[in-house]
Image (spheres, rainbow, N blue to C red):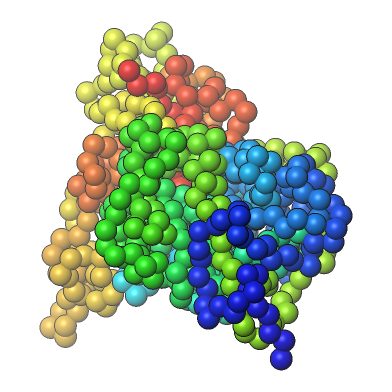
């Protein structure tokens, strides 16, 4: 039986991340430490590659720092993009590549699974935290209005994971890892775990300093991967991610974590369960209640100081040992401070503080029997710049080709005023609109949407799990259809959250240019902290955020901004706030 000791020369009983000290740290090299530059990924460059597994093509990009020579093991940070983003787009926005040279780490960004043929894509995604497993232990993961058949992926339909009428699945069912189902602790398999193993053979990596990060759906994947792979990973950085309600998990061993969330995020909210588009999540406080005891927290918090404190009300807190950190800032569903530089800096600063000396490679622990990985990808294809650019252009075009009609163009030459105008203009908002804060730093006149309280149909008590103190009134004295005890949630007079609906239930006039691909979406969004629960529904104009001319799709004076939608390639049109 082959046993390996930790890099420091001592056997470690379990995974234990400790503070990194450059003066005492002992690096643990991988088999990729060949003494020369990698044959796959040139030093100082960003290289894109693809791997085909069981007919499914996966792609990723690797930024190798200028200080890499194949002899000195480097840390590895792997970032998972949000729903619909490819690796190129994510790397540009999250900011981690820009710090790789200065901080001397390898930066990897991976594109998720995309087997959804519906309009409005691309649909790159991660199967994690219960995204394809509704109903879960605590009931459905979405409301009836949040349910959307267009979110059903081919792989999920084949696995009967797109039930009707309540279809809450919204990501691929392909084996992205860390487990086949996207929850639970075993078996550890799938593309991402095998990619970590493969990279260890291709690059000179310090096995004690492997990290996981990601935003939105990628932040969900980060939480899931951390919970399942605390033996391997030294720390994680989920950015505005969560677990779906009923699927929260804690790692088996302690694992440093930094959660970064905007206080105005109603897409994957930090402090309430129900999102503005009708999906249930686990609050950050509930997640940390599971993680903090494992991380040695004593229930007390103090400030976690960053270079960005005070900017957009940024404030971070940490447990006494610094292993559990939460950062909040005045923003929406977007990278920290709406800035690649700030996001990349905050994430990398935290991750690189930690090392896991018990990890000796391929998810093996020191002092335990060493198991070789079942899969090492040997079919890596290096992509040319032209191929990467062509794929990116195709992805942008898929967003533009949403299948939606053009808006009814209204200009100053018309006698009626357009919707979705500038609240700061001399005319202000229409009588059927409210001025609300949206996007990155924007405001907009948002048409109000009426709602009514209606009973919820049910078959069993599970269907009523999301209603407080409710149950299904299906006793033998009653006949179907059955209803949950008490009234349910507000029902908006619109196609809630569906950014590719030909009948969104919103005004379709705006002062846009001819050829604009802007289109309305209805959301639980307004001035209330729980807009969906409080019936605070409004319409916004979506826009193709990944387009090089994204702002031209919005009304004159407005810009296309991230921060309101799960689907990362779509932004919303907003005006500068005073």
The percent coordinates of residue 141 (x first, y second) are 37, 64
Give the camera-side residue of 531 and 484: 531
What residue appears at the point 34 percent right and 75 percent down from the top-left corner? 137
Q: Say left or right for 572 vs 488.
A: right
Q: Say left or right for 424 vs 91.
A: left
The percent coordinates of residue 43 (x first, y second) are 80, 45
From this view, report whether residue 107 is shown above or below residue 569: below
Seen as rendered, the residue at the extreme front is 23
Q: Quadrant of the C terminus?
A: top left
Q: Quadrant of the N terminus?
A: bottom right
Q: Say left or right for 371 vs 269.
A: right
From this view, report whether residue 461 is shown above or below residue 344: below
Residue 288 visible to the viewer: yes
Give the camera-side residue of 138 and 140: 138
Seen as rendered, the residue at the extreme bottom is 1
Give the camera-side residue of 478 and 392: 392
Q: Say left or right for 386 vs 446.
A: right
The percent coordinates of residue 468 (x first, y second) are 18, 66
What residue appears at the point 45 percent right and 69 percent down from the top-left corner? 254
Residue 223 visible to the viewer: no
What residue appears at the point 15 percent right and 61 percent down from the top-left corner? 487
């Amino acid at each position: 039986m082959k046993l390996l000791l930790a890099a420091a020369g001592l056997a470690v009983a379990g995974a234990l991340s400790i503070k990194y000290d450059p003066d005492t740290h002992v690096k643990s090299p991988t088999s990729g430490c060949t003494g020369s530059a990698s044959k796959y990924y040139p030093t100082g460059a960003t290289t894109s590659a693809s791997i085909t597994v069981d007919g499914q093509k996966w792609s990723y990009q690797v930024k190798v720092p200028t200080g890499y020579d194949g002899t000195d093991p480097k840390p590895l940070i792997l970032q998972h993009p949000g729903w619909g983003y490819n690796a190129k787009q994510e790397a540009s926005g999250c900011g981690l590549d820009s710090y790789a040279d200065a901080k001397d780490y390898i930066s990897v960004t991976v594109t998720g699974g995309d087997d959804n043929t519906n309009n409005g894509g691309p649909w790159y995604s991660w199967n994690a935290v219960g995204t394809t497993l509704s109903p879960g232990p605590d009931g459905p993961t979405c409301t009836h209005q949040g349910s959307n058949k267009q979110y059903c992926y081919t792989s999920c339909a084949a696995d009967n994971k797109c039930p009707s009428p309540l279809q809450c699945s919204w990501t691929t069912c392909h084996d992205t890892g860390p487990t086949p189902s996207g929850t639970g602790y075993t078996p550890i398999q799938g593309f991402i775990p095998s990619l970590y193993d493969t990279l260890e053979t291709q690059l000179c990596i310090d096995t004690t300093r492997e990290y996981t990060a990601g935003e939105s759906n990628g932040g969900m994947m980060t939480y899931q991967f951390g919970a399942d792979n605390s033996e391997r990973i030294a720390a994680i950085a989920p950015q505005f991610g969560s677990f779906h309600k009923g699927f929260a998990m804690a790692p088996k061993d302690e694992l440093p974590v930094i959660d970064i969330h905007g206080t105005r995020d109603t897409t994957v909210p930090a402090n309430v369960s129900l999102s503005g588009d009708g999906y249930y999540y686990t609050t950050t406080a509930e997640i940390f209640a599971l993680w903090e005891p494992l991380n040695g927290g004593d229930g007390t918090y103090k400030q976690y100081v960053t270079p960005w404190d005070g900017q957009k009300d940024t404030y971070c807190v940490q447990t006494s040992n610094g292993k559990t950190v939460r950062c909040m800032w005045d923003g929406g569903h977007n990278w920290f401070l709406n800035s690649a530089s700030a996001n990349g800096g905050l994430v990398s600063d935290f991750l690189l503080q930690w090392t896991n000396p018990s990890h000796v490679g391929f998810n093996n622990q020191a002092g335990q029997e060493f198991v070789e990985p079942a899969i090492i990808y040997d079919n890596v294809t290096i992509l040319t710049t032209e191929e990467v650019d062509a794929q990116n252009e195709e992805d942008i075009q898929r967003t533009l080709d949403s299948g939606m009609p053009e808006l009814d163009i209204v200009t100053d030459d018309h006698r009626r005023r357009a919707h979705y105008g500038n609240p700061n203009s001399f005319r202000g908002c229409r009588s059927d609109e409210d001025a609300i804060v949206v996007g990155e730093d924007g405001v907009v006149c948002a048409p109000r949407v009426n709602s009514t309280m209606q009973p919820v149909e049910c078959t069993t008590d599970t269907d009523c799990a999301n209603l407080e103190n409710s149950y299904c009134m299906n006793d033998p004295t009653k006949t179907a259809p059955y209803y949950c005890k008490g009234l349910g949630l507000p029902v908006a007079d619109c196609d809630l959250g569906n950014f590719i609906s030909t009948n969104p239930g919103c005004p379709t006039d705006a002062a846009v240019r001819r050829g604009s691909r802007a289109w309305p979406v209805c959301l639980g969004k307004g001035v209330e902290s729980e807009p969906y629960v409080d019936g605070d529904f409004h319409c916004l104009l979506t826009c193709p955020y990944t387009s090089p001319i994204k702002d031209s799709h919005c009304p004159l004076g407005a810009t296309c901004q991230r921060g309101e939608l799960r689907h990362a390639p779509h932004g919303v049109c907003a005006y500068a706030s005073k």
